[in-house]
Amino acid sequence: MTSITHTSFYNITCKVCVFVRDVVKSFFVKVIEMGEVAGRARAARELANMGRLEEAKQLMLRKDLKDE
């Protein structure tokens, strides 16, 4: 029976920590993206309610808003 050395044990736990970190990070990124989409949809609805249909359409069809 072989014993697990400190280095190999650290490498195993380190890989688990990295995996968990990546999963949690991607989860939060997706939550933020969903919030942005919901906010954009709400803004487009308000624009449409005010009669600004063209602006609402542009807001919903545009993927990147980094130009502004």
Image (cartoon, rainbow, N blue to C red):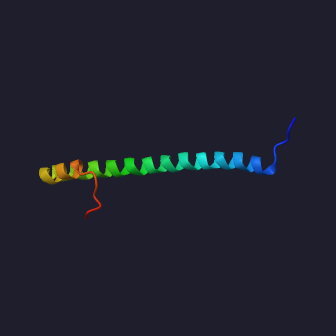
Where residue 1 appears, x then y in whole percent?
87, 35
For the C terminus, the image quarter is bottom left
Q: Can residue 56 be seen by looking at this rendering? A: yes
Out of 53 and 23, give the one closest to the viewer. Answer: 23
Q: Residue at x 42, y 51 (%)?
A: 32
Q: How many marks?
A: 0
Q: Measuring 22% from the left and 48% from the top, which residue is drawn there?
A: 61
Asked whether 12 or 32 is in front, the reply is 12
Whether residue 51 appears in this view of the structure is no
* 41, above or below 66, in the image: above
Q: Position of residue 60 (x, y in %)?
A: 23, 48
- Residue at image location 18% in from the left, 52% down from the top: 58
The residue drawn where x is 55% and y is 48% is 22
Q: Residue furthest top?
A: 1
**Image position, residue 38 (x, y; %):** 33, 48
Measured as percent of width and height from the top left, residue 7 is found at 77, 51
Residue farthest toward the front in the current orientation of the protein: 2
Quarter of the view holding residue 4? top right
Q: Residue furthest bottom?
A: 68
